[in-house]
Image (cartoon, rainbow, N blue to C red):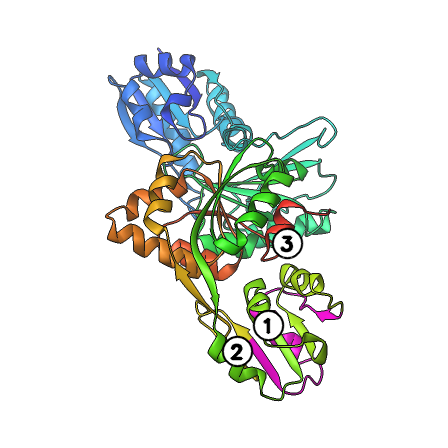
């Protein structure tokens, strides 16, 4: 007498996302053939069953034939056989192939649906795949196709979900661009969703490949593309933590409030102009002044008459500080970082260049005389760290790798470094630049988003 085969969906990851029906079937199973990515805790329900690892690794297409034959041979023995699959067995899970193979041989098969990672993983990350006025259509694709088959990237919905997205991410991004999605389209890549190792990266379609590479995102991963992802950067009603200098406290709080957020800003240092260096440099002959921060502008303002020089600002916030002082003609590089300034200065004759740097900056500006424009005087670090550990925050802003270095060192001296890092990772971490992201990652901080421009205005005000 033939047994019965159950094609059971295990859900996206965590064992407690199994359906009650799935648990009931597992408890009566004689044999369980399980995928390699399921939560091992799910197998505890199958305490009477012989458990057979059956997950296919990349490059093992022939193993599906073995799985089909194994299911059939166990069913012929009269066994209750469970094929335990990630997500839902009928969505990119070869469930249809296994169902057909068994039915053609007279085996009774029952399908027990599971939560598909295409829908459940974004939901767990608080991404609404459809939303009135934003997304009324949804397309689900796989990042892999059978050998020799081409993926069809036409007529994409307002929201696109791609399963198995990491290995072919560059190609997936390129194909979506050809299908009409722009490089500025928001997207999220969720790696190992619904597990303790889950990672979330939020960026734009044009930058997600580089960003996910920097973060070291690994399979399995789900890519969500569409305006619905913007909800993850909605600050309304959310608490936003930041560590700032005394001079930046009011501005940071004001910007967070304008975005609808609740500021939780900690003062950890003050900026002191490097008067000796600035006075000495002010007697020199310069054609162009380059400012890498608003602190550099404020520090130099007492020693230089900016109207006498060509002015370059690394980004929009620094330019606004110069304009606030009445200087309208300020050049800003297309890419707002040190490399962008270097490219800008190669574009025409700038004469003798003086660059005002932070003492925390690791690199100098080539072709210029570099001076330290100010000193950073740490203060209240221990108090800020302890207060942050007691607070609840939805977002944590990382605005400077130098300030983050101070914080990590102080937390280590207090014996609180790991606790401090873990606390950050419980929130959505936003970095204002690549160097900040790199330092954070090296210290175990899981960055979720890197801003398009290295300033708070672009983050909180957007297109205002």
Residue 95 point in image, percent of width and height: 49, 27
Q: Could you tell whether 335 is left or right of 191 in the image?
A: right
**Real-space CA distance between mark 2 and mark 1, rounded to the nearest whole angstrom:** 9 Å
Q: Residue at x 52, y 24 (%)?
A: 100
Identify the mark at residue 278; answer none if there is no mark.
2
**Real-space CA distance between mark 2 and mark 3, rounded to the nearest whole angstrom:** 41 Å
Q: Secondary structure at mark 2?
A: helix
Residue 412 point in image, percent of width and height: 27, 52
Q: Which residue is mark 3?
A: 206
Q: Residue at x 70, y 51 (%)?
A: 177
Q: Which residues are magenta?
A: 329-355
Residue 367 point in image, percent of width and height: 57, 84
- Quadrant of res 2: top left
Q: Is residue 2 visible?
A: no
Q: Nearer the viewer, residue 140 or 98?
A: 140
Contact? badges 2 and 3 (CB < 8 Å): no
Q: Nearer the viewer, mark 3 or mark 1?
A: 1
Q: Earlier in the sequence, mark 2 or mark 3?
A: 3
Count neighbours of disc 1 (C-alpha within 10 A) and say few if under 14, some if 14 to 19, many if 20 or more: some
Identify the mark at residue 302; answer none if there is no mark.
1
Q: Nearer the viewer, residue 22 or 200?
A: 200
Q: Secondary structure at mark 1?
A: loop
């Amino acid at each position: 007498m033939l047994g019965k085969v159950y094609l059971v969906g295990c859900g996206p990851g965590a064992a407690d996302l199994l359906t009650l029906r799935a648990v009931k079937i597992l408890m009566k199973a004689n044999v369980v053939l399980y995928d390699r990515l399921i939560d091992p805790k799910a197998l505890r329900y199958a305490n009477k069953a012989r458990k057979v690892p059956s997950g296919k690794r990349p490059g093992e297409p022939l193993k599906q034939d073995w799985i089909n034959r194994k299911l059939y041979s166990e069913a012929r023995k009269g066994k209750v056989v469970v094929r335990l699959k990630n997500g839902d067995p009928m969505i990119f899970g070869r469930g249809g192939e296994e169902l057909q193979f068994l039915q053609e041989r007279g085996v009774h098969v029952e399908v027990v649906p599971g939560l598909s990672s295409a829908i459940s993983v974004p939901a767990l990350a608080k991404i609404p795949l459809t939303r009135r006025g934003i997304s009324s259509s949804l397309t689900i694709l796989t990042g892999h196709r059978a050998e020799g088959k081409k993926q069809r990237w036409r007529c994409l919905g307002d929201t696109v979900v791609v399963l198995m997205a990491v290995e072919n991410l560059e190609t997936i991004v390129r194909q979506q661009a050809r299908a009409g999605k722009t490089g500025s389209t928001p997207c999220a890549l969720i790696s190992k969703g619904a597990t303790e190792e889950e990672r979330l990266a939020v960026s734009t379609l044009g930058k997600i490949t580089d960003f996910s590479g920097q973060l070291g995102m690994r399979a399995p991963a789900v890519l969500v593309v569409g305006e619905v992802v913007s909800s993850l950067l909605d600050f309304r009603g959310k608490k936003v933590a930041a560590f700032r200098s005394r001079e930046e406290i009011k501005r940071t709080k004001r910007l967070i409030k304008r975005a609808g957020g609740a500021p939780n800003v900690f003062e950890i240092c003050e900026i002191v102009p490097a008067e000796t260096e600035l006075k000495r440099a002010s007697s020199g002959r310069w054609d162009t002044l380059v400012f890498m921060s608003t602190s550099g502008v404020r520090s130099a303002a007492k020693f230089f008459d900016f109207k006498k020089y060509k002015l370059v600002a690394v980004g929009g916030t620094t330019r606004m500080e110069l304009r606030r002082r009445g200087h309208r003609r300020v050049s800003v590089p297309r890419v707002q970082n040190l490399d962008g300034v270097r490219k800008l200065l190669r574009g025409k004759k700038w004469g003798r260049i003086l660059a005002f740097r932070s003492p925390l900056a690791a690199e100098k500006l080539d072709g210029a005389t570099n001076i330290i424009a100010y000193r950073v005087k740490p203060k209240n670090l221990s108090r800020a760290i302890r207060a942050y550990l007691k607070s609840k925050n939805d977002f944590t802003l990382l605005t400077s790798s130098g300030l983050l270095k101070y914080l990590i060192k102080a937390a280590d001296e207090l014996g609180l470094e790991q606790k401090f890092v873990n606390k950050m990772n419980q929130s959505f971490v936003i970095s204002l630049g690549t160097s900040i992201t790199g330092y954070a990652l090296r210290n175990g901080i899981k960055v979720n988003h890197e801003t398009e421009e290295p300033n708070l205005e672009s983050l909180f005000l957007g297109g205002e």
